[in-house]
Structure formats: structure tokens, C-alpha cells
Amino acid sequence: MSIYLFAFGPAPLVDSLIALSETAHLVGSVGVKHEDEDSVVYHQLAEHLRDIVQDDYASPIMIFSPQLGDRFSTIALSIPKYHIHVISGMNVELLSALKYRSDLSAMIAHRSKGDEESPLSTNDESLDLDSIVDFITAQARRGLVILNAFLRDEGEESNIDASILETDISELT
């Protein structure tokens, strides 16, 4: 199985996040002009997916967007045919965390060799969409806890509701 990863949003944001996180080898860039009409942005994303993913409709596509409910996440979710999952809140830490998944690096290296006839064989069963989403969620939680501890003085109460760290994403769907 192959998983395709794309950062989708305004070109300056997408390009800078991928450069800062040093993930150009893992995450494809779909940067668009912010002032373009939604229909133009939709067609740019659809064409990019068609060019890269081609007819691989079974493999999951993970699209990182800037913000939940923004035009980019909405447009990404409206693309038909593909198995698309949108992760909102794209930032440097989130993209950087992907570098520490050796299974993703192996998959990308295999795909870049152009050997499409022999599938990626790995003994690691963790290369699936759910494990990647769980990994990203855990990284985001850890980042929030570290940031919270860093921003408050010793002895101060937290202004972050810790219950959000316990939210099961499946409850929201």
C-alpha cells in the first residue's frame, strides 16, 4: 500500500512550512494563489492529484491544510474518487514529526525508484493511515503540553483545558 501526503494551501505558507520542516522528500506541495477563485483552486488540486496519484484510487491520500473549515480543507474534501483524509492545523512541528516515521521514508524511497510493479514489502504492519493519524495526534498533544509548560511561570495554573487532550477523535465523527 502506498500513502500520498500533500500540503495544500497558499503557496507561500506551504512552501515555507515544507522548507522549514525539511520534508520535501515526504510531503508533496500543492501551493495555490490565495486570491484565486475556489473553482480554480479546486481544479489545481484535482489536476495535481491526477498527475501524481494517477489512477491509484485505493491508496489513501493525506492532505494537510492550514485550518479546520477553511476553504482549503473544504476543497480537499470535495475531490471525488480518491480516498482523501484531511488533517487541519498544518504547522512545522506536525510536518517535522513525519520525518521520524521510518516506514514513511521507506515507502517514499520505494515509490521514487519508479518500481510500481513490485509493491513495497515490509514486515512493519504499522504503515497504515490510522497509525499515521495516531502518531500525528500524539505529536500534537505532546507539543501542546510542552508549549503549555513553557509559557507559564512556575506555580501558575494552566489556561489550557486539559480535557481537550483526552478527546477521542472518533467521537467527533
Image (cartoon, rainbow, N blue to C red):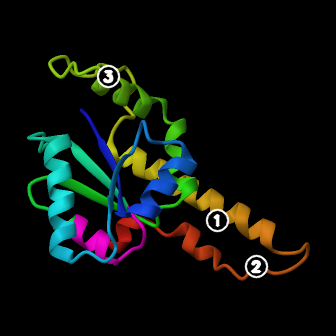
Q: Secondary structure at mark 1?
A: helix
Q: CA distance from mark 1 to mark 2?
A: 12 Å
Q: Where is 27 relative to 7, above or below?
A: above
In the image, what residue type sits under mark 2? Ser
Proximity of marks 3 and 1: CB atoms separated by less than 8 Å: no
Relative depth, front residue between 106 and 146: 106
Q: Residue at x 45, y 54 (%)?
A: 15
Dot placed on the residue nearer the N-terminal end, 3 or 1: 3
Q: CA distance from mark 2 to mark 3?
A: 45 Å
Give the labeled residue for mark 3.
Answer: 110
Q: Where is 25 relative to 31, above or below?
A: above
> Which of pointers 3 and 1 indicates the residue nearer the eye?
3
Give percent across and percent down for residue 32: 31, 64
Q: What are the residue bounds of the magenta stretch?
A: 65-76
Relative depth, front residue between 18 and 138: 18
Q: Residue at x 14, y 53 (%)?
A: 47
Check residue 13 for magenta coloring.
no
Give percent across and percent down for residue 173: 30, 71
Quadrant showing the N terminus = top left
* Residue 12 in the figure: left or right of residue 116: right
In the image, what residue type sits under mark 3? His
> Which of pointers 2 and 3 indicates the residue nearer the eye?
3
Callout 2: few (<14), some (14-19), or many (20+) C-alpha neighbours within 10 Å?
A: few
Callout 1: few (<14), some (14-19), or many (20+) C-alpha neighbours within 10 Å?
A: some
* Residue 144 in the figure: left or right of residue 85: right
Give the labeled residue for mark 2.
Answer: 158
Q: Where is 25 relative to 38, above or below?
A: above
Q: CA distance from mark 3 to mark 1?
A: 34 Å
Q: Residue at x 42, y 72 (%)?
A: 67
Give the labeled residue for mark 1.
Answer: 144
Dot placed on the residue nearer the N-terminal end, 2 or 3: 3
